[in-house]
Image (spheres, rainbow, N blue to C red):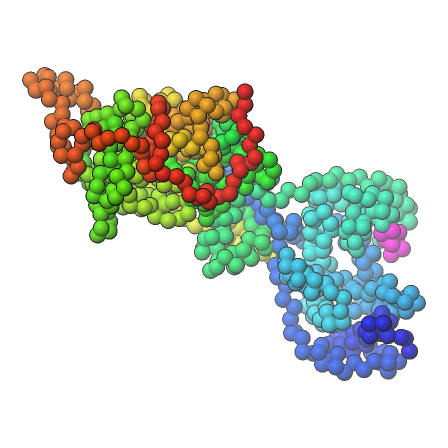
Amino acid sequence: MPKNRSGGGLSPTQQAAKFLGVSVLAGAVLAGIALPAVGALGLAAKGSVESFDELPANLKTPPLSQRTTILDAKGGTIATVYSRDRTVVDLKDISPYMQQAIVAIEDARFYQHGAVDLKGVLRALNRNAQSGGVSEGASTLTQQYVKNVFVEEAGDDPTKVAQATQQTLGRKIKELKYAIQVEEELGKKKILENYLNITFFGQQAYGVEAAAQRYFSKSAKDLKVQEAALLAGIVQSPSRYDPVNDEAEATKRRNTVLQRMADMGDISQAEADKAKETPLGLKVSKPKNGCITAVKGAGFFCKYVEKVFLSEPVFGKNRETRAKIWNQGGLTITTTLDPQSQKSVQASLKDHVYQDDKVAAATTLVEPGTGKILGMGQSKPFGFGKNETEINYSVDSKYGGSNFGFPTGSTFKPFVAAAALEEGRPPTQQYSSPYEMEYPSPVQTCESAPWTNRNNEKLENESESEHGPYRLKKAMELSVNTYFVQMIADIGLCPVVNITDKLQVRQGNGDKLPERPAIALGSVGLSPLTMASAYAAFASRGMYCTPIAIESISQKVGGQQKSLEVPKSTCSRAMSEQTADTVNSLLQGVVDSGTGKEAGLTDRDSAGKTGTTDERRNAWFVGYTPNLSGAVWVGSATQKVKMRNIYIGGVYNDLVYGGRVPGPIWRDAMLGALEGKPVDEFNTIHIPDEDEDRDRDRDKGRGNDDDDDNGNGDNLIGGLLGGGDNGGGNGANGGNGGADGGTEPSPSFSIPEGWWQGQTNGNGTGGRG
């Protein structure tokens, strides 16, 4: 009687004998296999058989995880992503040499035996008994396939993987029962096909198609005999026989497979000998997994698509369900990304901002009327190294962006203007607009209690020369802070919040905008995607469309393609056509003669707004044509860089503002994206300026150009005195949010620690020069 191990367990010989007894009994019961004399094995197998019979009758085979391909709108590949790099193929698409090689080396009697190979078990038992250990196994290809199913089902859970591969009698019994079922239901050819598609070939390649591509850059159907032998030899130990890292060992193993094929009669001895003399002939293709491999700088957009998939209920009732579908893969995702627009975005960013600059830039392009995201990129590439980042500066925190977005400065002012126009204020609306003033108080909110300026907070314009009275057109062109705060005091905060709700303007963390007058100056953090989508509503004459990134998805399951439902853009009216047309006319003035002159397009209608925030930590340009809207942000993700006396893109800037750095980025990105596209025109509203009214009044014998609904700078305006003698002080909660040149006020508020997602701007090394 063989001795027990020192730990008290069965010796290898006893384990093998017990397993043999169970196998034989189970085979006799379920598969009609001839039953040798059990007594000769000295087994008491009754308990084992009962455990065997208690196992579920059917093996649940999860769909094999495969690679997912993400395409642009023209069908070009952006990236492939996968938890398992696998492409499932039919047996007819696998080289006959490959089929023969895997059978020859892994299970030579595959076509002669059932689920269990009794001769193989006896042979292994004898050799293991002689060696005193487990030197040879007896698993058939069918049993190996079943084990791989367990591993596949375990996914990336290390505990489940360990359970699926543990060398225990219980697992062997389970494996055997399901192998018997599989043999009965599938037949040999299907088992072989499934095995070749599921097994691991090393180098991140699952299944023979991925392996053929990885090692030889060809399809599995085109494998030559020596190539097939190499792949078949890898399966037993992918690390030991890895031809990339140990050519000699892999060659030796390949030749063993070739000889086995000759012994089996699959090839002649002469063919085997000739193949043995052939070099390995590797043509290795590196694994290309994940958004980090995306082309044309579309890594951030690629990751955004993944985040959308994992968050949209249309893809599953909860995140766990959606993640399971994503990890299963086999998806072909056609996106909205326009390759021409994306190329232009990246080229413009590269020209204007260097990867190792102290600050970064992000640009997003959206199509008005459809919500389609056509371009998305940034100056610091997607990655995890120096001067790289995985944070998508263009989107909200939910989709992988910064924690709260970035303060937008004066690019928020068009929303205030639109709210006032919707409330019936004329486009010639005038306010006193002093150089400096206290925030007006009280200001009506959507709540019952008005906002009050309890701390006597003050704000000021960019320079002392900027003082009113101003009308809306000139105030927008010059980005006059006090004008728009007075406008909010006039109409109240609720109309502004209402219109931004319709435009789905939310803070980067998803919260609604706070009701305080400083929002007029862009004090809250928003994302470029949010801004581009909101401005697109002006371009589409007041219709807001939710942004979308996915056009269609198909999934390959069990050799069949099926379509998945995808989120659709929802379009709704955010403002009247009259209001949108008026805003278009106002913002055309900004790029024609205002702070955004450097951004203006010369070959088509364009409109936009500049924005710069306190201490020049952020600079923006958001603009649009009738058929494309885009937003550009420049700044430090940590909000620690003040853009004064700084090199950006190799160009020295004493002061950065919205029209200087973001404006040219926007202009060049738009020019390339729109090249060859239709040239459309805005529906505009004529807004008389003060000179026109002065001339008209002179012609009529009236010289007063301050005769409008709200009087001149000394009159009561919307419940507030518009005088400019409110004392000194600096902007609070917005400061010079939107000032675009000149002197710089000091803010009286600070940004709390942790407000922006932990970023180091990719460990930028500083400015050039």
Q: Quadrant of the N terminus?
A: bottom right
Give the image quarter of residue 141.
bottom right
Q: Position of residue 272 (x, y in %)?
A: 88, 47
Question: Residue 701: x, y in percent?
Answer: 6, 17
> Which quarter of the image is occupied by the C terminus?
top right
Could you tell me what secondary structure mostly forms the magenta stretch? helix
- Side of 427 relative to 258 (left or right): left
Front-most of 662 and 514?
514
Q: Is residue 119 visible?
A: no
Residue 263 in the magenta stretch? The answer is yes
- The magenta-colored residue range is 256-265
Spot the residue most to the right. 130
Q: Is residue 52 left or right of residue 351?
A: right
Q: Residue at (57%, 45%) from the top-left corner? A: 69
Q: In the image, is 694 to the left or to the right of 211?
A: left
**How far from the left and from the top, in percent, is residue 282?**
77, 40
What residue sits 81% from the left and 50% below the top? 240
